[in-house]
Amino acid sequence: MFKNRTAFPNSITRLTVLAVFTVIALTLFVVESAIPVPVPIPGLKLGLANIVTLIVLQFFTLPEALLVLTARILLSAFFAGQALSLLYSFAGGLLSLFLMALLNRFLSGRFLFITGIFGALAHNVGQLIAACLILGSPGVFAYLPFLMISGSITGLFTGLSAHYAVKYLKPHLSRFH
C-alpha cells in the first residue's frame, strides 16, 4: 500500500516517519535490555525491536527497512557500549530482514506471525554463524536447538504484535496519501 515512493506527500515526511520507526525500535531495544532473561542461554532475547522491522516491511520498501534496521543496530551498539554486539546484531538482523522480506512478499503481507517466527529463527542462525566465525569454533551451534525453540516462541509474539500494530496503523498512515 505504501511501498510506492509517492505514497507520502514528500520525501521529508517519508524520512520523518522512518526516523520515528527507528526511535521506536531503539526504545524497544533499550526497554528489552532492562528486562532480565529468565533462562541463562547466551543470545536469548525477546526481539521486541523486530516488531518495528516487520511493521516497516509492511509499509515501506526493503531498502528503507534496511535503513531503519541499520540505524537501530548502530545506535543500539552505541548506547549499549558493546562493539562486539554490533557484529552479532548485524549478522542476525540482516539475515532476518532478508528472509522476512522474502516471506512477506511470498505471503503478500499476510500471516505476520509466520514471518515473525522465521525472522527470529534466521536472526538466531545469523548470530550463531557470526559467533562461529569470531570464536573459530562450531561448538556454538550446540545452542541451536534451544535458540530454535525460544526463537519460535518469541517470533510468534513479535509477529502477532506486528500484525495488530499494522491493523491499527493502516488507517493512520493512510492520511499521508
Image: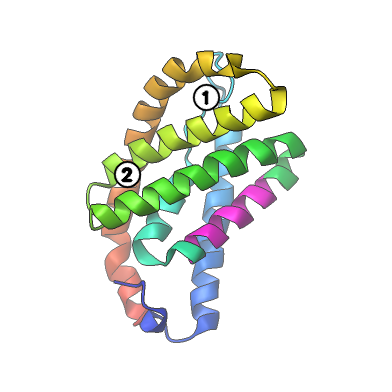
* Color encoding of the figure: rainbow
Position in image of residue 134 (x %, y %): 70, 28
Residue at 49 percent of width and 70 percent of height:
17
Position in image of residue 107 (x %, y %): 23, 52
Question: Which mark, by number, is residue 115?
Answer: 2
Pointer 2 or 1: first along the chain: 1
Residue at 47 percent of width and 19 percent of height:
144
Q: Is residue 119 left or right of residue 108?
A: right
Which of labels 2 and 1 is toward the front? Answer: 2
Quadrant occupied by the C terminus = bottom left
- Provide the residue span drawn in magenta: 64-76
Separation of marks 2 and 1 at Cα, in angstroms: 19 Å
- Residue 41 among magenta residues: no
Residue at 63 percent of width and 36 percent of height:
88
Q: Is the residue marked by circle 2 packed among few (<14), some (14-19), or many (20+) residues within 10 Å?
A: many
- Residue 65 among magenta residues: yes
